[in-house]
Amino acid sequence: MEASERIIVPLDVASASAACDLVCALKGHVGAFKVGLELVHVAGFDIFDVLCAAGAERIFYDCKLHDIPNTVAGAARAIAGFGVWMFNVHASGGSRMVQAARRGISEGIDGRCSAAPLLLGVTLLTSLGAEDLANELRVDLGPTDYVERLAHLATQNGCDGVVCSPHEITAVRERCGDDAVIVTPGVRPAWASANDQSRIMTPSEAVRRGADYLVIGRPITGAEDPVEAADAIAREIGAVSTV
């Protein structure tokens, strides 16, 4: 895999035109684009076709489904027809919900020519840390143990991989094996600020630990020259990959 292909840029913007501008500027310099709730709620579900027309070959739909199994199955069935590369569910929804998502994907692509999207399980949001787990969520596990448990649940029940912070990559890889796809937010080059994420790491270290794909937003989209920022990060990743 080329270093640039590991970079997923979130299109956290308030209009379809702004998202298309980023796609047009960055296509060929990054591997994929992430569509989250903000853009879908602003632009509607037609945004996937719009972005494909603008040149986005791979789209990660960051919908984080979390509901009763029947509802998640129906949503996954619909998403499978969007032509996205991957989407996600909250692993904390439990094994039956994850299984329902996988079933929905199978039903959604039945008779279609589109490939099945990858299904990822979200473990713990990167904005949350040990204190949040203990004091607010009343979870009697540290972040690494909690993430490892949810990653195992997800991959054992139909997920192709997981979303986890860089600090849990090693534990997840050991528990879930080499075939699990690991997508890692909370990645920031040393020259960028942390913003609202508490468990962060540089791109080179995340790849060294075993991440497959890195979600990198504001260091690229907020840069004076987004293309140069993306290329600089790709060079950093490439240096690790060739060692």
Image: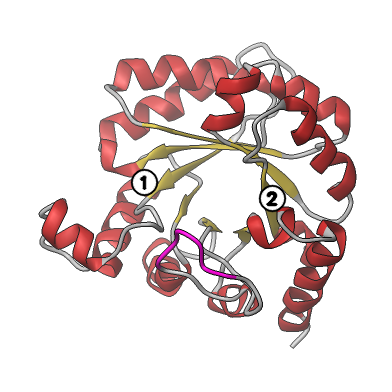
Is 218 or 158 nearer to us in this picture?
218
Tell me the element at label 1: helix
Vertical position of residue 44 compared to residue 221: above or below: above
> In terms of sequence position, does the residue under pointer 1 or pointer 2 come before the other?
2
Is 100 or 232 nearer to us in this picture?
232
Q: Residues within 10 Å of mark 2 (few under 14, many from 20)?
A: many
Separation of residues labelled 1 and 2 (CA atoms): 24 Å
**Residue 21 in the image, given as x and y percentages of width and height:** 84, 37
Vertical position of residue 43 compared to residue 151: above or below: above
Is 180 or 221 nearer to us in this picture?
221
Residue placed under numbered mark 1 in the picture: 154
Farthest residue, direction top: 111
The residue at the point 15 percent across, 53 percent down is: 136
Which disc number belongs to residue 9?
2
Vertical position of residue 3 compared to residue 164: above or below: below
* Labels 1 & 2 near each other (Cβ < 8 A): no
Give the amino acid at mark 2. Val
Q: Is residue 154 left or right of residue 234?
A: left
Q: Which residues are magenta?
A: 193-198
**Residue 8 in the image, given as x and y percentages of width and height:** 68, 52
Quadrant holding the C terminus: bottom right
The residue at the point 52 percent across, 24 percent down is: 105
Is 80 or 205 nearer to us in this picture?
205
**Residue 192 in the image, given as x and y percentages of width and height:** 63, 71
Give yes or no for residue 124 being in the magenta stretch.
no
Q: Is residue 192 left or right of residue 145?
A: right
Give the amino acid at mark 1. Ala
Quarter of image, res 138: bottom left
Farthest residue, direction bottom: 243
